[in-house]
Amino acid sequence: MKTRLVTDVPRLWGEVAAEVAAGRRFAGMFGTARPEGLLLSAHLAIPGGVAPLDTLLPAGAAGYPALTPRLGAAFWYEREIGDMFGVTPEGHPRPEPLVLPLPPGDARRPRPGQPGEPRVIEPDPRALPLHVIGPGLFTIPHGPVRSGVVESIEYLVETPGEEIPHLNMRVFYKHRGIEKRFEGMTPGDGVLLAERVEGPASVAHALAYCHALERIACLVVPWPAALVRALHAELERLACHLDVAVRLADAAGLAVATARFGWHKERVLRLVSQACGSRFGRGVVVPGGVSALPLTGPGELLAAIGRLDKAVSADIESLMGTASFLDRLRRTGPLSPERAREHGALGPVGKGSGFRDDARETRPYDAYSSLGLRPPATRGDGDALARLQVRVDEVAQSFRLLRQVTDELAEAPAGPLRDESGLRDGRAIGWAEAPQGEVLYDVRVAQGRIVRCRPRSASFHNLVLMHEVFAGDILTDFPFIEASFGLSIAGVAR
Amino acid sequence: MWALRGLRNGVLTTRWPARPDPYAAAGRGPATVLDERPADVDTEELERICPTGAIGLAGGAVRLDQGRCVQCGRCVTARPDVFGWAEGPAAAALAPGGLVVPEIAETPERLAALREGLRTRARALRRSVHLRHVDAGSDGTEEWEILALFNPVYDANRLGIFLTASPRHADILLATGAGARGMTEPLRRTYEGMPDPKIVIAVGTDAVSGGLVAPSYAVTGGVAATVPVDVFLPGSPPTPFSILHAILLGLGRIAPAEAARVNRKAR
């Protein structure tokens, strides 16, 4: 789809809100600093693709009318734009910093898209307000250094003692300035950085990034390479879903289940490392194809997948039959189908609430268009249990796909693994379905260098929904709800 | 029910480092230099190969700083005659200079002093140590690999190594990530909250040098800018075996040479 430039901001927001009301999914928004002003881009998921809608805010404008009052899903996106460019989304219900807290009016901003950058920007947490309102309420600050080996984020739990009426999240702690780092890199080096935006979803990020480059240059990924990509993408899905099982079992104190799923996850990572050298599938995906065929032969791969499937399925069956475990998940952290649809909730979070937009099905890429994906049954309960059931279904589906891909790979004719006809300048959007949900990359290349690259992880889009799922849940439900979302903070704070 | 399932597969736990482990020995480490003085060496070519600038020439010899290596394999693909993969878990060093290969000759005295200082501290910790982890801007994979140490395959508890939530109970600080500025203060305060003696390990190339993420307005380019690091472990991310090796190295329970010997035996 062609990029369209809508002339003024309110008109663009009107279009976006109307499209979402008509059933389209809002997939994100971001800004780009240009000499002539601030380019605001919104993404809408349409059948077969993702459409960008652009509008230009003239240089020197201190603010713009916010989209959030018309479309709640823009809530975090507009706060991030405020942090990055120092413009105020006027009418935003809470226009406070999100990823880079600075006092209002502070001119030091990263301004992605503008050549050069400030050498150092120290975040100033004092720019964040403290919110505690209501009689008898107090705040439990939980983070950024939390118990266990977890990524840095601060949850401010506001509670009268047991229930959690409100939750605030501070995600800025591990902001790394990734978007500015992309700028000036060659497209070939960019894939290495894309793999490190959100580590557990390295393959999906590399895929989405490369899809954008391939769309710009009209590259065709050779069939064996498309299969290798799907192989690693599904192995990554297995590892991430097993990780969620480990965390949920650990939260419930099921020591044996925690150990068993930890072992299975380790087996998946070892399978990946034996196939490509990296335990996270890094270095496999390159623009135009893949770097090499799996180091393990198809026969050996198939046998390993079969053994793993048998062991994982048996343990999943036991887990889903453990009443004391299921009781902790049932009706915990519910997300209503209406909210999931309105927000365009991605991945297992959306699917568990009956909203299903899987990029592998609706906007297929690489080998997925010919693998005959059968969508599993919809789960609509919206609670932590539904999100786990979605993952259980996806694990079974991944094993099916892995068998199919390995079989096809054994029969695929030998040939090049990469379209070498060269990368070009231009702008395109790439997507891939990560274990956490859809990953989007909006990439612009000029004179053989990246001038703007905006990764949008599913974690960023979904994490904001954590605000809304504590309906009568108490403090001890917190680890279950967090684990059931299964997100990576690296992909949120970037 | 679960108890029976737990017995089903017998003992899965590795015996490394007491016994060799094939997966430990085969684990991919950072890139290394195979041929220090290749015939047709071109400075510009060498510097262009590496996206993090880990490769350079010093006095006509090829030098690779593993502390900057993100294991992308560009150099191994471009010049398989000059570069290869280091194998096995012995990736960590007690000083950033110790990560430069081939080794720089001038450092043994300094290394001996570092090791002696570390030994004095580690002696007090005996054979029960508690780890505290702080994420200072990682990509999320290092957390997975540290957590893996406590799955039944690695089971670090068997070596007297435990996780603790409170810095007050911690002996070793595992710091990951490129040193996000938002985490500078929490990282420093966690370190200060730990009782002496304490050991700090920078886990991963990002924590050692910032890796691909540095330079950036938002990171310090490694955690050593904030806390005094004792053990530098490269890897993007490092494998669980190499993290275990780094912990044992910090505790003086495994010497770098000894670890290499264990690896050779396994192969």
Image: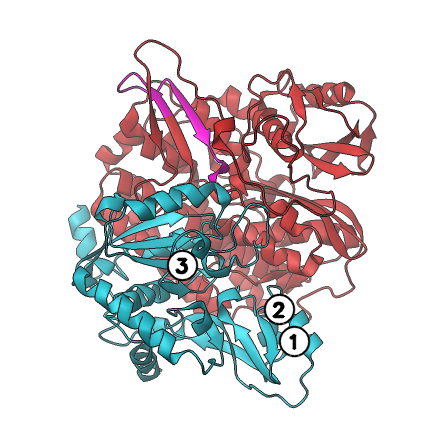
Disc 3 and disc 1 in contact, CB within 8 angstroms: no
Q: Quadrant of the N terminus of chain A?
A: top right
Residue at the extreme bottom: B39
- From which residue to which does the magenta span run? A157-174
Give me the C-alpha separation between circle 2 and circle 3.
21 Å
Q: Which mark is residue B203?
A: 3
Q: Which kind of residue does numbered mark 2 sit on? A: Cys
- Which subunit holds the residue at mark 3? B
Look at mark 1 in the image and give the residue it sits on.
B46
Kindly indicate the quadrant of the structure image that contains residue A68: top right
Identify the residue at image location x=33%, y=9%: A135
The local crowd at label 2, few if under 14, some if 14 to 19, many if 20 or more residues have their Cα within 10 Å, is many
**Is A166 in the magenta?**
yes
First in residue order: circle 3 vs circle 1:
1
Left or right: B155, with A58 as reference point:
left
**Is A288 in the magenta?**
no
Kindly indicate the quadrant of the structure image that contains residue B253: bottom left
Kindly indicate the quadrant of the structure image that contains residue A417: bottom right
The local crowd at label 1, few if under 14, some if 14 to 19, many if 20 or more residues have their Cα within 10 Å, is some
Instruction: Identify the element where label 3 is drawn.
Output: strand
Disc 2 and disc 1 in contact, CB within 8 angstroms: yes
